[in-house]
Amino acid sequence: MKLQQLRFLDAVVRNNLNVSSAAEELYTSQPGVSHQIKLLEEELDIKIFERSGKKLTGISPAGYAILEHVETVLNSVRNIKQAAREYSNANRGSLSIATTHTQTQFILPPVLQRYTQKFPRIDMHIHQGNPKAMCKLAANNSVDFVIASETIDEFDELITIPCYRWNRYIVVPKGHGLTRKKEITLADLAAYPILTYMLGLTGRSKLDKTFHAANLEPNVVFTATDSDVIKTYVKLGFGVGIIAEMAKSGDADPELDCIDASHLFPDSVIKIGFRHSRHIAAHQYEFLHMLAPYLDLDTIKELVHTKALNDRNAILARHQVPSFKELKARFLRER
């Protein structure tokens, strides 16, 4: 049995049993991948895949049992390499992050600025996309960390650490009728066309659930991934915008009014997640601390090495997750 054969198995499964795509990912030939998988099956005296002719159509029961161990072995190999790299050259390494547009634009800049000042020779890679796809990258160990909101809790493979709490702002053109109300209600909002984030992005599911719990149906007429796009179309008169408070510009926009909506919606929490079995390098622990500074390094290490969810929750219960405003104020003080 060869390590390369296990890599081939893993790539084929991740590419939905498409051997050609797996071969392309691994910079090798499709016949070479098929041949090595056949050799492994012969050595183990089992069929890992079900076939129709030469095409792979499914994973056999024995294959599922084998693949559980393959994932463990490959994770261990990655961890061995990363641990060795950390000790052979402590000043070099990499940090890969998967996250959304909102986090990339409004949260990561001050964190990564401090991080690069402290670790100037670390290579950084940021993958930006929808939360579910980004969480999958962390779940299959393709990136070090994912930063996301509610979606991250759907992935049992990930250990998560809360970073901060946030809520929402209503964005309307100057002079809009909502600006004259003493306190806006959900019914007031439901009476207008709403512009907000696409499903799966930036707390959208919690927004919808809040309306439905009040027996209201939000009239969502426009969705986008980018808060600035939502603001642009609010200015054009398409309706009322609902955006994350992180996206509220610090400088007053002469064409827009922003109204705090935290009395209408429950807080959402941004969390950072990483694969259970992943080795965390020293510089990556520092990154975790910078993004969740209310936790000291010893507590973060305790969370990383605590496998049971209930035990991690007990540790976190001793700490108050800061609001976005509190986190932002801390970033400003640490400049």
Image (tube, rainbow, N blue to C red):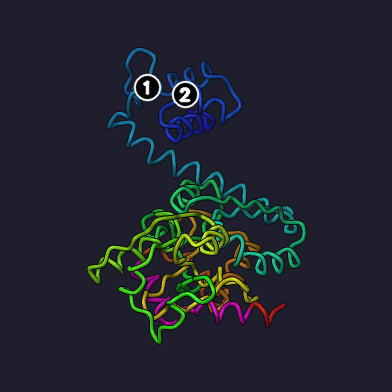
Q: Is residue 144 visible?
A: yes
The residue to which callout 2 is attached is 19
Out of 186 and 263, give the one closest to the viewer.
186
- Say which residue appears at 48% left-offset and 67% top-offset: 243
Marks 2 and 1 in Cβ contact (< 8 Å): yes
Q: Is residue 190 toward the left or the right of residue 35 in the image?
A: left
Q: Which residue is at the far bottom? A: 182
Residue 108, position as x, y percentages in the image:
62, 64
Secondary structure character of the magenta stretch overall: helix
Question: What is the crowding at mark 2: few (fewer than 14 residues within 10 Å), some, or many (at least 20)?
Answer: many
* Residue 327 shown in magenta: yes
Q: Label 1 sits on what residue type? A: Leu
Question: For residue 200, what is the image quadrant?
Answer: bottom left
Residue 317, position as x, y percentages in the image:
39, 79
Residue 155, position as x, y percentages in the image:
38, 54
- Secondary structure at numbered mark 1: strand
Precedes in sequence: disc 2 or disc 1: 2
The residue to which callout 1 is attached is 56
Q: Is residue 289 visible?
A: no
Start and end of the magenta stretch?
309-330
Q: Is residue 284 toward the left or the right of residue 140 in the image?
A: right
Q: Label 2 sits on what residue type? A: Val
